[in-house]
Amino acid sequence: MLQIGDTVVYPMHGAGVIAGVEKHEVLGEDRSYYILEMPIGNMKVMLPTDNVENLKLRDVINEEQLQEVQAVLKEPLEKSVGSWNKRFQAHLSRMKSGDIRDVAAVARNLVLQDRIKKISSGERKLLDLAKQILVSELVYACSKSPQEVEDWMYGVLSENQQH
């Protein structure tokens, strides 16, 4: 059972804090929702209280897992095969796993690929989503602002030189 003040990660959206519970009428039925406030863009997500176990929510990563994320960001660009559309689908399915290391790998691959050859607009949107998910969780894991986390991430990626 979630409590107000809990910090959780919602796959494909990112991390946030349970700010409250609200009742809303949907299709003629009153339903209760947890309100998840995200640190980026003042976004709020409503999570149905009666279906929360199926949402694959998880805890924010710890210090050891933060080191794993940093290690992923330092890894080389994964060689991709096929069209941008196949790369897009592969990246999207990785992000849906909910694993922060997969999200970090997608962000890394897209940033490094963009350095070599500009990525498509679809891949750019996916990169923006990956950054949002990654930054939102690292805000809580590191107790830093979104800008500080993004600066750190790009600092790590700038050390990642492709040859």
Image: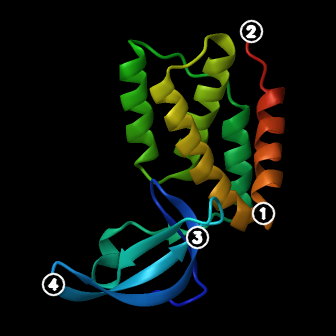
Q: Give the label, 4 or 3, closer to the camera.
A: 4
Q: Nearer the viewer, mark 1 or mark 2?
A: 1
Q: Quadrant of residue 59?
A: bottom right
Residue 103 on image: x %, y %? 55, 44
Q: Which residue is mark 2?
A: 163
Q: Residue under circle 4?
A: 28
Residue 1 visible to an observer of this rendering: no
Position of 7 with respect to 29 (left or right) is right
Where the C terminus falls, by quadrant?
top right
Marked residue nearer the N-terminal end (1 or 2): 1
Mark toward the viewer: 4 or 2:
4
Q: Mark 4: few, some, or many residues within 10 Å (few <14, many ≥20)?
A: few
Please name the residue shown 81% across and 63% down the image: 144
At label 2, the amino acid type is His
Under mark 3, the amino acid is: Gly
Among the two numbered marks 1 and 3 on one chain, the one whose residue lies closer to the N terminus? 3
Residue at 50% x, 36% y is 126
Number of other residues with Cα within 10 Å of mark 1, as a class: few under 14, some 14 to 19, many 20 or more: some
The residue pinned by badge 3 equals 16
**Quadrant location of residue 71?**
top right
Q: Which SS class for mark 2?
A: loop
Of callouts 3 and 2, the N-terminal one? 3
